Amino acid sequence: MTDLVSSVVDRGVALVTLNRPERLNAVDREMGPQFDAVMAGLAADTAVRVVVLTGAGRAFCAGADMERLRDLRVSEGRSLNVPTPGEPDPLFDAIDAPPELRARYLLPMALPQPVIAAVNGACAGVGFLLACACDLRFASQSAVFAAAFSRIGLTAEGGLAWRLPQLIGEGASADLLFSGRKVAAPEALSLGLVKAVAPPEALMAETMAYARDLADKVSPRSLRVIKRQLRAARAQTPLEALALAHREVVASLASADFAEGLAAFLEHRPPHFPGGD
């Protein structure tokens, strides 16, 4: 079977590639479960410190495969093999995903490691949701984003109406979700949807350089804990966030990563973080 989702790990950085370039990496019933399996494997791999997600060819992900969507019949209760959000599921149980993140296209949020999207072209529909679920997004100058659901009679799928306002605010989210219009990379940058825009030929180098800096110079334990803090903060009061921050800093002070980070600072050398809890 063709690897519709590939993963290569190099010195702590995993590069995940959606690999249906002839269909602009549109998600079908075969690609979806492969994506689930790859992401679950990375979540369990303590050697992986950062994940980069991109698409093969000229697209990041054009959304769900329209040929597959054409075959769906609501009356038959058929779907694209997407796990039911919030329900018990071996995949999400294995990575200890909270109830609100138990949906396929929110998997990057559920991973313990930072996930960075390298958006190399078309990024639409569930592909747009997938990019939004990543912690950071880098975009090619040729990238085009579209939450195109409304233009084919669908609604904001898979938690996008919850996730997008976290990134760009309610007003801008309403615009993109109501209109389904295309957003070019410069506008995505101005909205705060992407961290940086690069020439097409430089996108992967810039994204991987950022990921490499995190993997080499930052405590992997700190990365995991900070991601948990950011995730928890969405439902916390300020007092609850402060209480969690206090517990985590106390635990950090007793960690091997802090001992190494402090020693490296005092000895004027690069740190070699062990990464354990």
Image: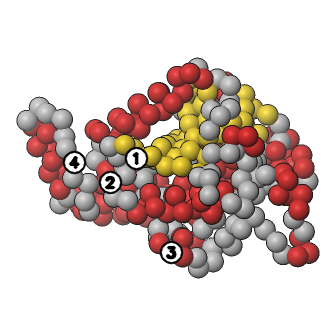
Name the residue at 8% across, 35% down.
267
Q: CA distance from mark 2 to mark 4?
A: 12 Å
Q: CA distance from mark 3 to mark 2?
A: 20 Å
Q: Position of residue 31 (x, y in %)?
A: 66, 56
Crowdedness of circle 3 by 10 Å Cα count: few (<14), some, many (20+)? few
Element assignment for label 2: loop
Q: CA distance from mark 4 to mark 1?
A: 18 Å
The residue that disc 2 covers is 47
Circle on res. 9? 1
Look at the picture and state if 86 lies above or below 72: below
The residue that disc 4 covers is 273
Image quadrant where residue 225 sits: bottom left
Element assignment for label 4: loop
Of the image marks 1 and 2, the number of the one nearer the N terminus: 1
Of the image marks 4 and 3, the number of the one nearer the N terminus: 3
Q: CA distance from mark 1 to mark 2?
A: 9 Å
User: What amino acid type should be assigned to the residue bearing mark 3?
Assistant: Asp
Name the residue at 52% across, 22% down.
202
User: What amino acid type should be assigned to the residue bearing mark 1?
Assistant: Val
Of the image marks 2 and 4, the number of the one nearer the N terminus: 2
Query: Can I make out residue 274 in this image?
Result: yes
Crowdedness of circle 4 by 10 Å Cα count: few (<14), some, many (20+)? many
Q: Is residue 248 left or right of residue 83?
A: left
Query: Can I make out residue 166 in this image?
Result: no
